Structures are given as C-alpha cells and as structure tokens.
Amino acid sequence: MSEETTRAVVTDLYAAYGRRDFDREAELIDDDIDWIIYGPMQVFPFAGHRHGKAAVLQALGDIAKDYVLESYVPKVVIVDGDQAAVMSDVAFKQRSTNRTLRFHIANFLRFHDGRLVEFREFANTFDLVVQALGHMLPV
Amino acid sequence: MSEETTRAVVTDLYAAYGRRDFDREAELIDDDIDWIIYGPMQVFPFAGHRHGKAAVLQALGDIAKDYVLESYVPKVVIVDGDQAAVMSDVAFKQRSTNRTLRFHIANFLRFHDGRLVEFREFANTFDLVVQALGHMLPV
C-alpha cells in the first residue's frame, strides 16, 4: 500500500467516524482486524482486545450505547508506509448523566489492501475514569 | 527537516534513553520544548506539562528517582516529515517496592533543526496507577 493510499484511507476512516457513518466505517475495517483499546473494562466495557470485524463493530456499538460522540478532531496525523498514528481531541457525552467527557486520544493503525488490520488506542485512562465516575479516586 | 533526518534523530533519541545516556538525550531536546506526559501527578509527580529543556530534564530526573528503567523497546516507529509517533513496550522497577511495572507507551514527537520541540506521552494510566499502588481502585 502506498503512503498516499494510507493517508487517504486514514482521512476517510476518521471522517466517517466523525459524521457517525458506521456503514463506511465498517467497509474500512478488515475482517481479520486485531484491535485493542487500552483501558479498564470495569468502567469501559467496550475496552480491551477484540479480534475480527464483528467484535470491533460490537465494541463501537457498545461505546454508542453509553456515550454520544460530540466531537472528534484529529490534530496530528502521521503516515508512514502502511502505518499511521493519529492524535485527536475528543468529547463524548455520557448518556446516563448528560456530562461531557473531554480528552485526548492516541491511535496507532496499520492497513492492508485499503483496510484497517491493526488498531491500538491510548488515552489517559485514570483521568477518563475520574471523568466517567464524576469523582476523584483514592490514591 | 527531511524525513530521513527525523528518523535518524528518533533512533538516536530512543537509543540514548534505552542506554540511560542522559547527556545525549539532553543534546537532542530543544531549549524551548513543549512537553506533556498525560497522567495523574498525585501518583506520578513527573507527569504533566513542562516547558523548556531544564524542566524536562528535571522531570526525567524525577522519574529516575522513583523508577529504574528495566527495558524500553520501541515496537512501532512512524515518521512523517518533522513528526514521529513511537509505540513501545516498557518495564520500570519501582525503587520503593522492587516491583516491576510493565506497560505500553505511545509518544507523539515533533522536531525542529534536529531537536525535539514537542512531546506528548500516553499510557493506560488507570492500569499504571493500579500497578504503582499494588492494588485495584474502587470503581
């Protein structure tokens, strides 16, 4: 895959997510994708390791059950061969409380034949848990 | 800065950190660097925003006061123009307990004239706090 193709697919993928176009999103995810959102599943049940498109779409659906995407703005997009890294500013409204969680997200992506085959997501999950629970944790 | 130069400086920077060569590290950090490690400062006092080389070297020194670097292995290095992203597997031994914390780190970097001018570090900080404290948090 050329770097230009990778860049185009990254743009396509984040634009689709930003406008909540999950059909397009699904088209860009490989059947055999290896996917990890690093975070505590006790608080964020959609976090953790998923293998295969169906499991990933289920995780995306589980996010949408608990949170409304308010904004997703990629601030840095780094592309190198068939890999990319994207750092974004995001806001999600928690449906149960109507509170908005704001944070930065770091994604590492790898593509094959125009589709996402590997995905790793990082965030400052301690802060995210504090925002989700609405109170500080005893540390 | 050419992409090849960026790649060479990234390699230099992580090799220096890996062999604990803080003098070389310091040479590769710009005087005016903008630096953020996303994480709770109550548990990791070296986290947070730092501006300028002196403050960053102080933060690196503060990490070394509490933790011994056991291993730092960049697994994915993505370079694009003057920017880079690096995902690493790392292990740090907590001096106070002799316990080893193992985790993944995601870095976003920007360079100017061969030196690091912008740095953002992400990790699954909820898990990191649990590892550092040695017990689960009430969630």
Image (cartoon, coloured by chain):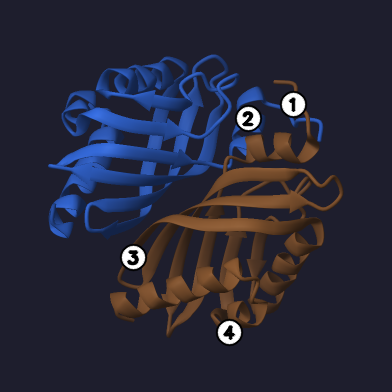
Chain colours: A blue, B brown
Q: Which residue is mark 2?
A: A129
User: Mark 3 or mark 2, which is nearer to you?
Assistant: 3
Q: Which residue is mark 4?
A: B27
Same-chain check, marks 1 and 3: yes
Mark 2 falls within which chain?
Answer: A
User: Mark 2 or mark 4, which is nearer to you?
Assistant: 4
Name the residue rendered at 20%, 31% in the picture: A30
What kind of residue is marked 4? Glu
Q: Which residue is mark 3?
A: B79
Query: Of callouts 1 and 3, which one flags the residue occurring earlier in the amino acid sequence?
Result: 3
Horizontally, is A3 left or right of A48 in the view? Answer: left
Which quadrant of the structure image shows residue B52?
Answer: bottom right
User: Mark 2 or mark 1, which is nearer to you?
Assistant: 1
Helix, strand or loop at label 3? It is strand
> In whole angstroms, how far apart are the C-alphas of marks 1 and 4?
40 Å
Helix, strand or loop at label 4? It is helix
> In whole angstroms, how far apart are the C-alphas of marks 2 and 1?
10 Å
> In whole angstroms, how far apart are the C-alphas of marks 1 and 3?
37 Å
